[in-house]
Image (cartoon, rainbow, N blue to C red):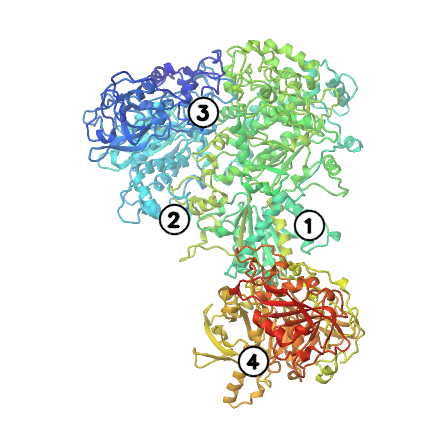
Amino acid sequence: MGNSYAGQLRTTRFEEVLHNSIEASLRSNTVVPRPVFSQLYLETEQPLAHDGRTENDDEDEEVGSESNSPPLPYQMKPPPEGCCTTDGFCQAGRDLRLSSLGSDPSDVPPGFMLVGVRCPSLPETLLVCAVDRRFLPDERGHNALLGFSGNCMGCGEKGFRYFTEFSHHINLKLSTQPKKQKHLKYHLYRNNQGVLVKGAPICWRGHDGRMRQTGSSLSEGHAVSDEQPPNMALTRPTHTPGSYTAGSAVDPVALPQIADVPHQLTNGNHAAPSITQPPLNQARPGRPSAKGSHANAGPPKKRHKGWSPESSANNLPESTAKTPPSSSALSTLSLSSVFTNGARSETAALLSSLQGSSLTPLSPPGLSVAIPDQLLHTCRLQPVIFKGHGPLPQLTGNANEVLLSSLLRSCYLSSQTLPRVYQHYGPSPIQPLSTEMQILLTVYYLVQLGPDQVPLIEDLEQIFMRSWRESHLSEIRQYQQPQAPASQGRHYGIETTSTLPGLPQHLSLPPQSQQPLTPSQLPWLAQLAASSCGEGVVVLGEKIGSLAQGLQQMFSRLMEGRLENTNYVVVIVTTPGQETQSCVVVTGKHQCRALAESMYSPKEGLKEINQQLSTGIAQELIHYCNSQQDGDLDSLLDSATVDSSEPSPLSSSPESAEERSLKTTHSPKDTNSPKDSHTQCSKDLPSPKERVSSPKDTCSEYSVEWREVRPIQLAVARKLLSHVCAIADSSTQNLDLGSFDRVSFLILVPSSEVTFQQTVLHLWNSGVLQELGGLDQECVSQREAERFVVKMDQSAQARLDSLTQEAQSNSYTLYILVHDHAHCDINSASHSSSDSGLGLVDQLLNSRQVRDAPNILILHVTSFPFALQTQYTRISPYNEIHWPSAFSNDMDLYHEKTRYFGVSELLETTRSGSSLPLMRHDSSFESMASALEERFSKLHSAVIRTTVLIQHYCVALMAASGRIDSSHNLHKHTSVETLEIVQSLLTASQQCPAHHGHMVLLRIPSLALAAWAHRRLSRVRRQLGLEESFEIILGNPNQALNIGQSFTDQIKTWLKIQDADWVPQTYLELEALPCILILSGAEPLGESLPRSLKYCDLRVISCSYLQRTTLEQELGLAAYLVRAESRPPHNPAPGSDLLESDAEKLSSTDNEEEEGRENRDSPLSSSQQVQSCPDSGALDPFPAQSTTSPNVSQKGTMDATQPPSQSQTQLQPQPLSFPYPQATIHQPQVQSYSQAQPISQLQPQPQIQSQSLSQTNSQTYTQTLPLHQSLAQMQIPPPQTQPHPPAQSRRQHPKSTSSGSLSPRASSPHQGCSWARGVSRPPSVLLPRALYDIITASDSSGLPRCSSFLPHMSVAWASSFRPLLSKMMTCTEQSLYYRQWTVPRSSHMDSSNRTEGRSDNFHPRRLLLSGPPQVGKTGAYLHFLGILSRMLIRLMEVDIYDEEDINYSAQAEGVLYHPPNASWPNPDIMRTMPFDYTIHDAKYDDISSVYCPGFTPSFEGNPVRQEDVYLRRRTARIKLSKYAAYNTYHHCEQCHQYLGFNPRYQMYETTLHAFTFTHLLLGEEIQLYFIIPKSKEHYFSFSQPGGQLESMRLPLTSDWTPDCIKSPIFTPTTGRHEHGLFNLYHAMDGASHLHILVVKEYEMAVYKKYWPNHIMLVLPTVFNGAGIGAAHFLIKELSYHNLELERSRRLEGGAPTGDVWPFIILADDSCVMWNAVELDARNGSVEHAVSLKQILQHMEACPDLAHYGLCGIRKWSSRGLTGNEQREPFSRGLLHDFLLLNVDRSQNVQYDQNRFTCHDVDFTLRLHSAGLLVCGFNSFSVMKKQIAIGGYRTFIIKTKTTDVPTSVGPSQYICAPDSKHLFLATPAQLLLEKYLQHTRQKLFPLSTKNYTHPVLSVDCYLNLGPEVTVCFVSSRPHSVNISTTGLLFSGLLLCFVDSFVTPGFLKKFTFLKGATLCVISADRSSLRQTVGRLELEEEWRFRLSDEFQTANAKEDRPLFFLTGKHI
């Protein structure tokens, strides 16, 4: 407090002043004592301390503000000689330790309490001392007086006044300054055994360490007065936990503490309890005349003009100072809670749960109360009676003159209905609040309300909850621990610490110290509480025998005028032996009006307004307002009406107004005479025709940005898409994205024509229609986009019906129903009449046809999702998408050019204090409206407020136009805010060459009032001749936009629109048009506003409907996207563009009345003030800031000490107030100074030397002063010496304070485009005072108060026992909160969404997108539609390898062996065809070519590629055919059974079967495992059902069925459990087939999980690290073994053995589609997609198939049949990827089980050399999908030591035997193959690019790199080999040679000299044996260093090889 403000607290007289004030408030009901802190603040002349800090800073700092800075060294003074210095003892030698004193009786003086002191040297021990409780804080850290008073409990010494002194006495040996906050740690109390024990910690830290409120609180219990009967307990010596609040020494019976109000000094008055006085501590003696009881926690903020000690409460129109944001007190919460028809539904459940209570709704017969005649006429009010406890007597007479409300009764009921959690375990110690306690708390609440406040049921409910929780704290915690629902998380448990701000802190005691409040005590306690506010609340309790008697007494007092100053009458009946009864009667005029209006539903309210307008009741008001001016307003207007043929009456010469303004602008000696000034204000704008015709009148800064898609919108669209994919991927099968091939959509919008057109506009500009293929951009107009948008009116029914029919017939189209602005109509169809237009959403979107359609997805879009988030919501919490918060850390990722400025940012500006807030209220307007409301009590307040507001606008237009003589003092009849708005509107367009201006939004909910306002303003505009200056638009939701033709032409010019018939249809298209938009309608319906919106005038919106949705909807109109680079508007740099004036104008909104009355002696006369109005118009580009016309109807003068404007605030410090006026002293000097120079040459004020003023049009920001620095903390010289005091105000030349374009004034009348400056600043918002107070208040969690209101009229709170929303909650957590704590009313469409036995009833295809208003949700969901369509197309497409066959170019022309149309190959012809050794598959373009005589390759065409080459191979995106194979992400209805969703079988029901066979090559038994689903067991034979697996059934060759494939399909796979294409259902076209996945053992579980209905063959463990060769080897050997078993089984069955089908299919796991070539007479060969079934049946039907060992098909390429068109239909060469293998004929040729690469090339070469026929069916092709995950090629080479893949070069794959080398954890064979591939130049130098001298490879093919050619020969007898005669080989490769290789065989071949030999063996001994056996040393030279091994450890069995050179 000390160094923030100039005033200082005199701590020495603090107690004296405090107690005097308390005593005065207790003794008097009428006298208002001087506010405590007003007396304690010194005058500002008091000199500051030398260092700028105040004298009591040190004391302030003592308040628990332990900082992070190191402690100051502190030297304790030495103790007196002879004293005891032992730790734990005092200097007198007495023991102080708690352990010692625990059992001793303690003598504690009254007002003192026992406290535990922490001793640094005895950390485990507490010392006992007694401290005056006034110097200790309460449990929230407040109300501790500065200083100390304590006694020693050891020696008994008393009166220690300083804690330093006391710490010496008790031997606290400290190294730092003694502070009570640091060392007084715990309260002490006696337990049930009477032993003193440690209690709760003392709470030293409050909300504001600098404010020390006095303890305005008594202990929980009755305050005992002097007259108290002796039988009441006076004191209780033991303090239980919870009773140690600063206040009194008594702790009697059960009265809750009346008002421990943190931060609330009502009207500046403090009250503290006295031990012997009753607790009249509401600080409201009498009924003060202050209008608002704003809490005041200290001096005012910088905006406030003064806080003079002389200003006492009784002469202030409103409270002297506003509430600081941190202490938003209860008193700022105004107006009543609203429910439909004013009452909560009193459910039967609530009533039945309270049987036997006093809350019975029936009234006993015979009791009735007569309503006095002429009550309304006499009292001019309609009393509101709140039913309370007990039956209300029947009212007779004119019942229309009294209103009844059951709101209060509902509140009582709900807060007595305990949550089930506390009733679950039978009898509970937790009881609801008693009737008496509820009544007493109600009285407390009413006492706290300000005179202009209306009771709010939510507040009372929270008070009840707070009190209940306080009284059952320990039990609640017991129940809370085990039972808090898991979903609640940390937010939803019962809060025990949160409080409503400003509410009584301790409203009851823990049960152990609480005694029940008896009915007999209730009346006098209630009267005691009410007495503190004078006559404001009257309690009728004593001698009242019944409610009827009390009401009769109330009516008689009312008629006699004795309740003139009374707002509430509380009637309490406490008859012995009967239940306590009560009711509350509202008798305050303001409160009665507000409550009466809130009882209307919104619809009824508008109906009432219409009726008042139509019956002419309002005419008297309008006439009255007109006649208030000095002369009738209409006659003034008539005198000003301009004849267009005459010059303006102000023109002194024929020159145009524009020329005149140019001259006046150029004149530097311009003076401020009223006439000249008016002339400046009245510059007429040129007509639009002139504007358009001028070629140079263009504005370079104008741009329309609402068509752009922003990065954050793209991000949200992707989030939407991911949620849709999540629904599709879930196991619920609710959405099968794979089955849709296109997207269609329909957007449903509220029934507003502008919203409809705006959505159409966004849709057309988004390009979505073109992307979806619905329209062709060239040939279609925007009109056709309207087909996709539907207004939710009666026409919507037909459109939705046609869509559902369309959806049923087009099952492959996904329909998206976008329900935009979903909060607008959530009414139940059954509760809405058909003509109302409500309930349509429920009727259409929740219909069975839409709900059950599997191809309709519903997306709700809204800014206010709360109403859709109830306990019965249809939307899963997992399907909610929330717009990224501006406060989240990931906002930077979006690289936004704009920054969203919404409701929370608006609220921030009200708290920043550095400039005028963007959101404010208009006190002048409020005062005028209030006066008229009292005068016209029968009129609806909306009629009165709208009439006053329009009158203000009319007067402001007259004043600003300059056409009315200044003698009329028009400014007295409008408010500063309105005048500024109008002047800014009129002058803005003059500053831009293109005449861009801004929009003023005038929100008038009633259509009738809005139409009247439009007519009235239009007439005034016409009479003033301003029709061409600005447009007035009536925004009626039911009508299209209507703009004058001249303004339409203007907009067309700006937007460069050529279409002659174009008219604007949305508000967005009004960008930069100067206009007043009167927006009508009960609620905004989603209309977006242009960025030129500058003022959002909400002064006449209803204050009756306080729901979160309603409030945020209205505030959302001002939401805005600000350029990201611009500064936050509430903290601008000195040079920032604050637009015309908002930051600099007087704060005429918040405190105008206070200023007027405080400074009534200001010498400025009203005539001087008038000068400043005209001073603003034409000259100043920031005109509004020069208006100072005050609210003269309330006060005659302005404050002479207004704060400086914004730019001044940054140039000089601002003293709070001056005790004498100063402005007039310096005024002439300042004016001449500022007018004589261009403003750019002004020098900065001397106080801040470094502040520069170099500011230009280009928004250059210069800031040298930290803006957050408190201005009052700077050194302020005495005011007398200040050359330009802050009192210089807008009366000076406006340029001296403008903060924008500061170029020299003489340059041009166009000072830069006002619109361009405006887009970097959000609009200003003007609110009704009542709403402003509510919105700017915060609850205890720091959230705006309105966020804790009921979310929507159609929902209700599930329980009063709910926590408050938390500030830390994310959107998701808020959603969960509302889902838990709100239930829909019967009128809500979700109320029917309950299904018995289900915990949720979510619709699976329903999403909710929520985001703040105007943030760009429409663009996001439109983009979502586009990317969803692209994704569906993408889902229907795959990346196919599209590579041209290689090695064809150099081949000689082939001869046709078969006719082109041959269906099957002829074996005899095939044998005559030469075998094509050339590799044609492009995936093998990096391997060694196989030598083929007569073929010469081109080595240049095959560059060396990297390992991940297949990731970068050429692909084509191809749409999937209906015969495609799919991965695990595909689910369609047809596939369900195939994938295992068979109703006959339990899903995942599989069996594991072992299968063993012996193989000679492996030398041991092989055990394989089959995993066989139950549904596939018929493919196998078992020894018995469920017994041993014997074989896999094979068909006979003669079998043929049209829907069956005979060959089993084997697919080896690894790492592709999700992405492998194993779903062959569509590829097989439904044909029956046997498909077996061959998987490695360690992957068995994951494959089984993803493919539960597939048969799996699990390889043995030893093959876990093996390659593809091992899998094919085992498949082939197993198949042959199974063939033998089947033949045996058939033989036993009597069938011929040779007839068993011997073929199997080996298919790659990436084969996705198959094609067939058909010959067409006209087009040649045509390729088209066919099913795999067709291809296999065709191949299996080949008559001579048994002659072939291997068949295959070619790989697809988009180039079709390369080479000649008449390509051979069958080929004899290498085959890959998809093979049909004859396991019988190929019995003796095995796959190499060790191979990792090129195994198929190796196998085919060996098969051919064995004499078997190989045939490729060239008329068929297979498409292979690019799958970048998994597969047999993805082996990672890593070191043995670490598991992390490291970069190991090929040279490290081998090493010398027995050497120390880095061993690799990679199979030896793979290392060898990779080494040979990458080191060919080193190993076979002669072979590189030497096709004619290949490397001879015997019995195997190994890849030696693309530049080496390999000649394959087989050593087997009778094998088929190429002729090698005459060939010279450049190398010899012998790999694992067997006995067929002999020295004689090798001698057949000749080698070049220096050719390389490479011999590979499994170990070193076999290597030597091979060299010896083959007599290699005869022709080859070996060296010892030429022996190598693979870099494997010995246990990994490395391979060895030896190299040599040919001699």
Q: Element at badge 1?
A: loop
Residue with the mark numbered 2: 485
Q: CA distance from mark 4 to mark 2?
A: 62 Å
Residue at which label 3 appears: 292
**Disc 1: which residue:** 767
Q: Position of residue 1754 (x, y in %)?
A: 69, 72
Q: Depth check: 1039 or 280 in front? A: 280
Labels 4, 3: front one: 4
Amino acid type at circle 2 is: Pro
Residue 1787 visible? yes
Label 3 – label 2 distance at C-alpha: 42 Å
Circle 4 residue: 1680
- Asked if the residues shown at circle 3 and circle 2 are in contact, with their CB atoms under 8 angstroms apart, the answer is no
For the residue labelled by badge 3, is the local secondary structure a helix, a strand or a loop? loop
Q: CA distance from mark 4 to mark 3?
A: 98 Å
Amino acid on which the number 1 mark rests in the picture: Gly
**Of residues 947 and 1917, which is closer to you in this image?**
1917
